[in-house]
Image: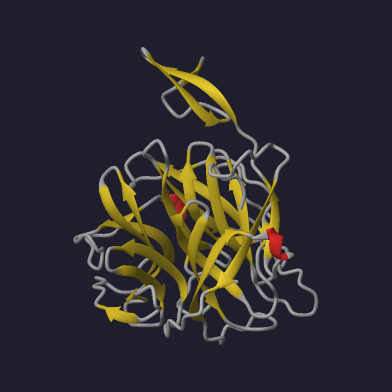
């Protein structure tokens, strides 16, 4: 369960829901798109562009990470990603107060450590980036540390940047993973936040929506965790939060026909998300499995058709309208607490 991916490895409250109450049940479904991307790898990260979807992923190339431009029809063309020093995995991009930055994991042979770094993008497509900077000494561990990594950076509604990352304070079980978070005002230097965002073995988190009072996350379960009977394959899950810190119990989203992990995606339209994920394996975890990148669509299910495979029912997150003040300005928010810098009236 080492999430350094030099080897192939590895909803929900919605503002747009009509008349959703605190007890309402929202049904979602994940449906694989009828496309064949023709790309392999794990830890995909997608960036929507005017030319299509730019998909980064760990693909055993010398630099550790490859990139392709994929059309709506699913035709993917390799791009030239320049990685100084090589050895980059778990690549992701986030908008920060200091500009667009690449975030990734890298092994340092000199110190025998693996750590999460960030670097300023040299170009708008982030196919080239500058000098890597350590995000936090707390996100630097021994090279062989198991069940650690897969950082997911996200811009918060108040402008700060948060990284979600898998940690395992104890390896006493086959399902030790917990999700921690680190916060930054500039997107460069990060400080660990108290507590755990998720426990009980969830990994590969990806924030799909981060709005005041309205957060959506997709994730997988760890390779030692699946409770899917005789066929122990990883599955995809969804969860919701009103603040990005406290999350509802994840609900399973996919079947057990094949392993699914490392989801990434973006919102296409209200409550419709395009998802990319790594797929492979149909039994116990095998480090030699070759993973391919698949594409799917997640949306609210059409319950008038009698249900569908892969539907999950999740209670809508609780929120309310509160009045907050900052200086002489008064504003109403749909949330459980006021944003940073505001006080509840």
- Tally of numbered tags: 0
Residue lying at the far right of the rendered structure: 229
Residue 140 seen: no
Q: Is residue 195 left or right of residue 93?
A: right
Q: Is residue 65 left or right of residue 126?
A: right
Q: Which of 62 and 14 is in front in this view?
A: 14
Q: In which quarter of the image is residue 139?
A: bottom left
Point out residue 258 in the picture as x, y percentages from the top left corner.
64, 80
Residue at coordinates 58% horizontally, 30% vertically from top-left?
336
Q: As displayed, is residue 279 above or below residue 17?
A: below
Q: Which of 25 and 307 is in front in this view?
A: 307
Q: Quadrant of residue 261?
A: bottom right
Residue lying at the far left of the rendered structure: 122
Residue 258 seen: yes
Q: Quadrant of residue 286?
A: bottom right
Point out residue 210 in the picture as x, y percentages from the top left corner.
47, 45
Point out residue 201 in the picture as x, y percentages from the top left corner.
66, 60
Q: As displayed, is residue 340 above or below residue 6?
A: above
Point out residue 5 in the picture as x, y percentages from the top left corner.
47, 74
Q: In this view, does 93 lie to the left or right of 139?
A: left
Residue lying at the far top of the rendered structure: 328
Q: As displayed, is residue 121 above or below residue 257?
A: above
Residue at coordinates 65% horizontally, 60% vertically from top-left?
302
Quadrant for the N terminus, please. bottom right
């Amino acid at each position: 369960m080492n999430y350094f991916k030099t080897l192939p490895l590895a909803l929900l409250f919605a503002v747009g829901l009509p008349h959703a109450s605190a007890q309402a049940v929202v049904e979602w479904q994940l449906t694989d798109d009828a496309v064949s991307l023709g790309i392999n790898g794990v830890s995909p990260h997608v960036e929507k562009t005017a030319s299509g979807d730019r998909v980064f992923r760990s693909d055993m190339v010398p630099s550790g990470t490859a990139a392709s431009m994929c059309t709506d029809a699913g035709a993917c063309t390799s791009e030239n990603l320049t990685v100084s020093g090589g050895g980059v995995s778990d690549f992701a991009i986030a908008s920060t107060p200091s500009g667009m930055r690449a975030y990734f994991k890298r092994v340092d042979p000199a110190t025998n450590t693996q750590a999460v770094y960030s670097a300023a993008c040299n170009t708008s497509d982030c196919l080239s980036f500058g000098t890597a900077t350590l995000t936090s000494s707390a996100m630097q561990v021994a090279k062989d540390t198991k069940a650690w990594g897969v950082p997911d950076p996200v811009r918060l509604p108040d402008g700060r940047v948060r990284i979600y990352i898998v940690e395992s304070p104890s390896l006493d079980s086959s399902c030790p993973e917990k999700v921690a978070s680190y916060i930054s005002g500039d997107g460069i230097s990060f400080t660990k936040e108290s507590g755990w965002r998720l426990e009980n073995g969830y990994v590969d988190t990806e924030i799909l929506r981060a709005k005041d009072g309205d957060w959506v996350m997709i994730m997988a379960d760890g390779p030692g965790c699946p409770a899917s009977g005789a066929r122990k394959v990883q599955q995809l899950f969804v969860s919701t939060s009103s603040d990005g810190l406290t999350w509802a119990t994840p609900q399973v989203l996919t079947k057990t026909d094949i392993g699914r992990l490392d989801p990434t995606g973006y919102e296409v339209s209200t409550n419709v998300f395009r998802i990319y994920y790594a797929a492979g394996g149909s039994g116990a975890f095998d480090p030699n499995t070759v993973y391919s990148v698949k594409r799917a669509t997640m949306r609210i299910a059409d319950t008038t058709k009698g249900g569908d495979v892969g539907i999950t029912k999740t209670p809508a997150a609780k929120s309310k309208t509160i009045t907050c003040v900052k200086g002489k300005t008064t504003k109403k928010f749909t949330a459980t607490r006021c944003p940073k810098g505001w006080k509840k009236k």
